[in-house]
Image: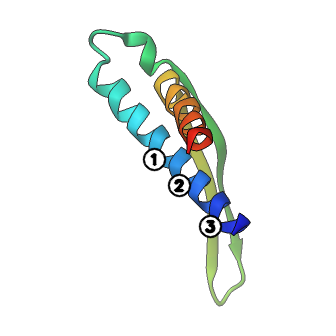
Amino acid sequence: MRKSNSIYLILLILMSVIIGTIIGKAFSNFLPILNYGEGIGFGPATLDLNIFKLTFGFSANLTVAGIIGLIAGIIIYRKL
């Protein structure tokens, strides 16, 4: 039961961050502060084993609207 609650929390947070980012882009003409943010992550790293090649990498752009969505998702989770 505990594991399903964790998955539910992660999905709720991801959805709320995505919705927050979409809302931030939609209202960027009226409130440009919503799109202020920084990119985080690391560049691609390649593992070549002659049989196959794997490339790993991660990047994310965290904005004010996304952080507001993240906080809203956590609050909604606690209310449920």
> What residue would you read off at disc 2?
11
Q: Residues within 10 Å of mark 3 (few under 14, many from 20)?
A: few
Q: Which mark is residue 15?
A: 1
Decide which of tag 1 and tag 3 comes sooner along the chain. 1
The x and y percentages for residue 26 are 27, 25
x, y percent for residue 36: 49, 18
For residue 22, which quarter of the picture? top left
Residues tagged 2 and 3 counted as in contact (Cβ below 8 A): no
Q: Residue 46 at what x, y percent from top left?
A: 67, 66
Please name which of the two marks, 2 or 3, marks the residue nearer to the observer: 2
Q: Which residue is mark 3?
A: 55
Rendered residue at 42%/32% (across/down): 20
Which residue shows up at 71% across the image and 72% down it? 47
| Residue at 47% across, 40% down | 16
Q: Is residue 44 above or below residue 28?
A: below
Of badges 1 and 3, nearer the viewer stands 1
The amino acid pointed to by label 1 is Met
